[in-house]
Amino acid sequence: MIETQAIKESIDDFLARQTADVERVVREAAAAEITPRFRQLAEGDVVQKSGPHDLVTVADRLAEEHLTRELTALLPGSVVVGEEAVHADPARYDAIAGDAPVWIVDPVDGTRQFVHGDPGFCTLVALALDGVVLASWTYAPALDEFATAVRGKGATLNGTRLRAGSPEPGRPLTVATSHPDFTTDDQKRALLGLTADGFAARPCGSAGLEYLAIARGALDAVAFSWELAWDHAAGLLLVEEAGGAHRTREGVPFAITGGNALPFTAARDEATARRVAGVLAGGA
């Protein structure tokens, strides 16, 4: 316990001094490996993983390598859980529940959009310890948007404070939902509740940018059916620090270490999160 507290104090000091250094590393990784390949991918630069909606490009791999090298150099003793490294070695994912500070990295969130020349993609980085996300960085280079959140310190977009606010009373809730290819039959039935009156559901794009939309008050909620931490860690903290909340079907906050009752929701405020979670659980 004493050692964990010492690590936490060390990270707090790191975040007080070097949050801007992390932003620099994220921007440099994107500038070196992602943006030069945007709308410039060659035929052999894109590979399917689990299916046609699960793609990886050379930009994903090289950006993750860049981030892994530079982030661990910034914070000695830290480790990286990155989407592409875990795809190659699933055991790496266990580090999220380990004792070391962990960088949770999605080098290109929204790879499908990136491949199709759509600017709706981003790089996601979160720093966590003991299963708690302490800071996050969300960078959409093609949109020139950079969002940062530090636990207890708020969230900003391009230097301006983010406030999610609350949905307008009486208006249907706008909700971005998981693609049907990534849902089980049970999850499809749960998500079907969001097609009822009072909701305006649509398919989600980049998870990181959907979370940013909530944090800036442009989207009321998301309902997602998967729990891979690199898709959610950065955005969930962004939403929390902008005044929002997240809940699983069981009504408890989402845990990045896994074991969540799915689908889960994140929303602009606590009342909206509970309302959507209730629908996902089969309630009113």
Image: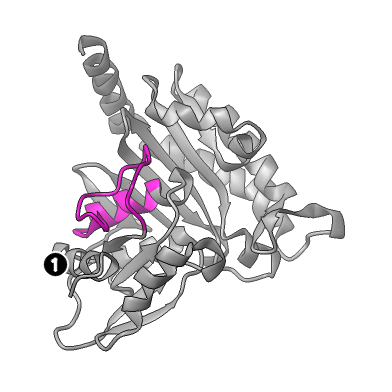
Q: Nearer the viewer, residue 206 or 273?
A: 273
* Point 27% across, 89% down: residue: 197
Drawn side of residue 84 relative to residue 179, left or right: right
Circle 1 residue: 271
Q: Is residue 257 magenta?
A: yes
Drawn side of residue 193 relative to residue 51, left or right: left
Residue 48 against residue 7 in the figure, above or below: below
Three-letter residue code for mark 1: Ala
| Residue 95: % across, % down | 46, 26
Residue 208 against residue 94 in the figure, above or below: below
| Residue 199: % across, % down | 29, 83
Q: Nearer the viewer, residue 178 or 230?
A: 178
- Label 1: which secondary element: helix
* Point 55% across, 62% down: residue: 121
| Residue 205: % across, % down | 51, 68
Q: Nearer the viewer, residue 241 or 31?
A: 241
Which quadrant holds the C terminus? bottom left
Residues rendered magenta in the picture: 233-262
Q: Quadrant of residue 192?
A: bottom left
Which quadrant holds the N terminus? top left
* Point 60% across, 43% down: residue: 29
Q: Quadrant of residue 15?
A: top left
Q: Is residue 127 magenta?
A: no
* Point 38% across, 54% down: residue: 147
